[in-house]
């Protein structure tokens, strides 16, 4: 999904105007000044919440000509975000020893409308622009489903030590899962992840050239519904479409599918999800279980410096900390032992009888 530097088409004005207004609001919050420490802390918390709640728009603003005057403010806040991935100890072992991330196909995730947010809008625009083509609906749906099936994701949250995340992702799956809490939360600074992505995207990287069309980090936009009449969804749809409308038919649909992978229903908003997205160029690397592996050890990036802290989940045995430290040391992962801590979340898992 490529952001556009020049988007002068009048049909983009709704999104561009909204983006500019959001930037002005952020600028006004940044200009607030308090001597009292309490009010300073409250102001900083307000700015952080406002930034995270509009992260999707601010991410786009980094690349828009109309909002370049706000880029320094946005970039400063963006670089100070920490991302959190909730998983199990078993998965941590695979990440560390394999120096790779397992990405899942977006159509296999827990949202049955994954990747479909902009489908109806794009189908209408496609049909209108191809009115001489027979079986337009079937042709569009076939291409849309094909390109959507090639998009894979690794999910992060902007929330640390969050009860809902622990409950959903920090336990073993299966009958006896609740008897063995084994949650792990990996903290990765946004700036380090962006450096890793830039390394992966280097021209001479053979994995990227051979296998992937896209490797990028994307915040999620949450909308109340996917129906016509949703102003934000409508603005984003038009912005994405008219920014790419001159591309070849297949490339346009591929681009639209990648935009769709960044939009979800607002009932998932409390996850504050940020995705590492990969669009496949080479389908042969898909594993039997429908996942792909993204190598993290790159020529210009030291995988051992990726993580800044690790949190062990609620009710995870304290002895697990020693096992984590041993795992990291054996694989040259540089995390200060003081930054490997037990969760403060009081979540209690309901054990199976």
Image (cartoon, grey):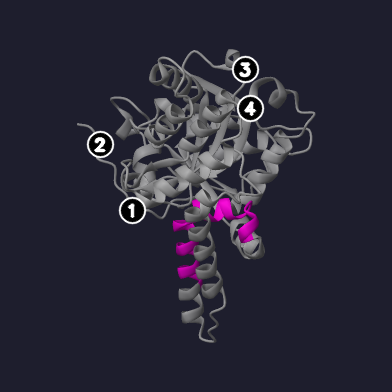
Task: Look at discs 1 and 4 and give the one toward the viewer.
Answer: 4
Q: Earlier in the sequence, mark 1 or mark 3?
A: 3
Tell me the distance, in whole angstroms, between the alpha carbons under discs 4 and 2. Answer: 44 Å
Q: Are marks 1 and 2 in contact (CB under 8 Å)?
A: no
Q: Earlier in the sequence, mark 3 or mark 2?
A: 3
Tell me the distance, in whole angstroms, between the alpha carbons under discs 1 and 4. Answer: 43 Å
Q: Earlier in the sequence, mark 4 or mark 2?
A: 4
Range covered by the magenta-colored residues: 44-67
Mark count: 4
Q: Position of residue 317 (x, y in %)?
A: 42, 41
Horizontally, residue 198 falls left or right of residue 317, namely right
Instruction: Using the image, determine if residue 21 lies above or below residue 142.
Output: below
Q: Residue at x 54, y 56 (%)?
A: 58
Mark 3 is surrounded, within 10 Å at the Cα level, by few (under 14), some (14 to 19) or many (20 or more) other residues, namely some
Q: Secondary structure at mark 3?
A: loop
Tell me the distance, in whole angstroms, between the alpha carbons under discs 1 and 2. Answer: 15 Å
Q: Position of residue 188 (x, y in %)?
A: 59, 47
Horizontally, residue 23 falls left or right of residue 205, namely left
Mark 1 is surrounded, within 10 Å at the Cα level, by few (under 14), some (14 to 19) or many (20 or more) other residues, namely few
Which quadrant would residue 120 be assigned to in this image? top left
Tell me the distance, in whole angstroms, between the alpha carbons under discs 3 and 2. Answer: 43 Å
Q: Earlier in the sequence, mark 1 or mark 4?
A: 4
Mark 2 is surrounded, within 10 Å at the Cα level, by few (under 14), some (14 to 19) or many (20 or more) other residues, namely few
Q: Earlier in the sequence, mark 3 or mark 4?
A: 4
The residue wearing badge 2 is 351
Q: Secondary structure at mark 1?
A: loop
Instruction: Using the image, determine if residue 218 lies above or below residue 97.
Output: below
Q: Is residue 294 magenta?
A: no
């Amino acid at each position: 999904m490529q952001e556009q530097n020049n988007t002068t088409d009048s049909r983009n004005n709704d999104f561009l105007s909204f983006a500019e207004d959001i930037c002005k609001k952020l600028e006004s919050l940044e200009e607030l000044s308090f001597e009292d420490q309490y009010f300073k802390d409250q102001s900083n918390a307000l700015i952080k919440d406002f930034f995270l709640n509009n992260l999707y728009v601010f991410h786009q603003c980094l690349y828009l000509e109309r909002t370049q005057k706000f880029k320094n403010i946005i970039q400063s806040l963006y670089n100070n975000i920490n991302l959190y991935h909730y998983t199990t100890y078993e998965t941590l072992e695979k990440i560390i020893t394999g120096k790779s991330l397992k990405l899942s196909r977006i159509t296999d995730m827990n949202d049955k409308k994954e990747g479909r947010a902009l489908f109806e809008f794009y189908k209408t625009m496609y049909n209108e622009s191809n009115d001489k083509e027979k079986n337009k609906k079937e042709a569009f749906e076939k291409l849309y489903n094909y390109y959507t099936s090639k998009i894979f994701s690794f999910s992060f949250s902007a929330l640390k030590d969050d009860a809902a995340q622990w409950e959903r992702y920090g336990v073993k799956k299966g009958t006896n899962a609740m008897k063995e809490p084994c949650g792990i939360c990996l903290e990765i600074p946004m700036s380090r992840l962006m450096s890793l992505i830039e390394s992966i995207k280097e021209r001479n990287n053979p994995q990227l050239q051979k296998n992937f069309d896209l490797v990028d980090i994307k915040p999620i936009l949450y909308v109340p519904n996917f129906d016509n009449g949703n102003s934000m969804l409508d603005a984003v749809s038009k912005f994405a479409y008219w920014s790419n409308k001159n591309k070849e038919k297949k490339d346009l649909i591929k681009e639209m599918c990648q935009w769709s992978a960044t939009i979800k229903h607002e009932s998932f908003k409390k996850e504050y999800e940020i995705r590492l997205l990969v669009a496949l160029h080479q389908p042969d690397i898909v594993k039997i279980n429908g996942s792909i592996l993204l190598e993290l050890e790159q020529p210009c990036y030291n995988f051992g410096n990726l993580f800044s802290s690790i949190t062990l989940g609620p009710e995870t045995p304290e002895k697990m900390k020693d096992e984590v430290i041993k795992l990291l040391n054996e694989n040259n992962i540089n995390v200060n032992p003081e930054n490997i801590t037990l969760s403060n979340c009081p979540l209690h898992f309901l054990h199976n009888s």
